[in-house]
């Protein structure tokens, strides 16, 4: 051959090709490709999300997280494992089928599902070692927080009104709060709904006044509701006691002047016969609002003056009971 250098290169190339063709280590026969770990089909409460090795998943507690773990092994077998850090995460994370400790050559798919009922900040580590290549890992990071972090929930009683104040330090996906009340050992009933702030990392303050309660003891709780329908209860730590008034009282009607309606509040310190009537300026009775026996407590009467002419009127409250008689009269004005 005229060019020995070219001849030598051709011989070396043929030699290498022969080794490659006849080698027992080939792609088809299980070449030592490293195993792979992939995260696919991740959904949060049924909505697809982007989640993969090395990424963070930020979501509120009581949410359903699901995804598929794909492990592809090219060697004859490999050891596999998964571990949470911190260990013992809340709830019951599950794999379907159960996650093994060894797998054979091929593609393996495991469906993961988890509802965390509480806060959790940590990660889930997947590990695959085929004995030939360096071990392969996949770390999934979790930042699971309570939808609402309640920092305070207190009550204040004024006569027969209860003012409830609560504060949150942060909120995630918060639709709002059902305020619920019950008599002691009684059934819970919804009093009012207060809109939440959605998602915010800033403190938020809320207030509601439950008015005109009868004498008795009450419990209160908040039912915090997410936009996805999940909820959590927060109970007021103390009982609320609406006691009997310590004295007889008749309040000025409000509004005054009025048209056509106004309200009259009055307090009864003991049980007795109650009469509440309205007179015109001549002393003629024009309306009898109440004439019945009532228990001690805080009350409110509504006056509808649609049939009354504009002018000055007087309303008188009489309480008879326990050997005592109380009478109080106040002035009001209808303005049409």
Image (spheres, rainbow, N blue to C red):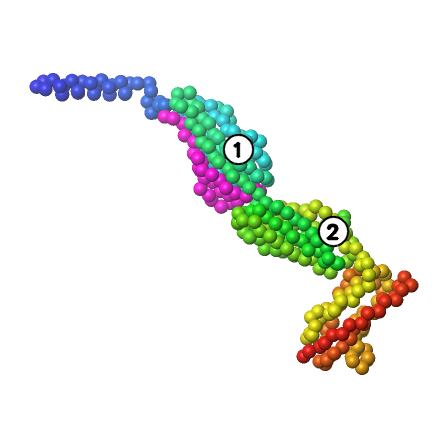
Q: Position of residue 138 (x, y in %)?
A: 45, 31
Label 1 Cα neighbours within 10 Å, binned few <14 / some 14-19 / many ≥20: some
Callout 1–callout 2 Cβ contact below 8 Å: no
Residue 188, can we see it?
no
Q: Give the range drawn in magenta.
A: 33-62
Q: Pointer 1: what residue?
A: 95
Question: Of the residues tagged 1 and 2, which is closer to the observer?
Answer: 2
Residue 240: numbered disc = 2
Q: How many labels does the image show?
A: 2
Describe residue 37's horizontal placement relative to residue 257 as left or right. left
- Closer to the chain start, of discs 1 and 2, is 1
Label 2: few (<14), some or many (≥20) within 10 Å? some
Q: Residue at x 27, y 20 (%)?
A: 20
Q: Which residue is drawn at 51% across and 45% down?
A: 46
Q: In which quarter of the image is the C terminus?
A: bottom right
Q: Is residue 144 rendered to the left or right of residue 160? A: left
């Amino acid at each position: 051959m005229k060019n020995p250098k070219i001849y030598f290169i051709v011989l070396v190339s043929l030699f290498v090709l022969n080794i490659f063709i006849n080698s027992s280590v080939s792609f088809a026969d299980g070449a030592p490709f490293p195993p792979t770990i992939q995260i696919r089909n991740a959904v949060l409460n049924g909505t697809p999300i982007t989640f993969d090795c090395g990424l963070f998943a930020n979501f509120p507690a009581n949410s359903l997280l699901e995804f598929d773990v794909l492990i592809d092994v090219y060697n004859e077998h490999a050891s596999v494992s998964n571990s949470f850090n911190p260990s013992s995460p809340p709830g019951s994370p599950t794999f379907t089928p159960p996650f093994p400790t060894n797998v054979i050559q091929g593609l393996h798919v495991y469906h993961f599902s988890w509802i965390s009922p509480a806060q959790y900040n940590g990660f889930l580590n997947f590990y695959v070692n085929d004995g030939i290549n360096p071990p392969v890992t996949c770390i999934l990071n979790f930042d699971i927080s309570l939808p609402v972090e309640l920092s305070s929930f207190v009550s204040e009683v004024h006569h027969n009104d209860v003012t409830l104040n609560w504060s949150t330090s942060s909120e995630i996906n918060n639709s709002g709060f059902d305020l619920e009340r019950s008599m002691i050992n009684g059934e819970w009933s919804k009093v009012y709904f207060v809109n939440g702030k959605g998602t915010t990392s800033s403190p938020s303050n809320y207030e509601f006044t439950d008015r005109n309660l009868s004498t008795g003891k009450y419990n209160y709780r908040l039912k915090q509701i997410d936009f996805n329908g999940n909820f959590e209860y927060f109970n007021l730590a103390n009982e609320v006691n609406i006691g009997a008034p310590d004295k007889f009282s008749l309040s000025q009607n409000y509004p005054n002047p009025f048209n056509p309606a106004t309200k009259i509040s009055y307090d009864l310190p003991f049980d007795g016969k109650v009469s509440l009537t309205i007179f015109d300026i001549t002393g003629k009775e024009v309306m009898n609002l109440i004439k019945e026996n009532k228990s001690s407590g805080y009350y409110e009467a509504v006056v509808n003056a649609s049939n009354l002419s504009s002018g000055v009127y007087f309303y008188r409250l009489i309480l008879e009971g326990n050997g005592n008689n109380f009478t109080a009269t106040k002035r009001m004005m209808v303005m049409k």
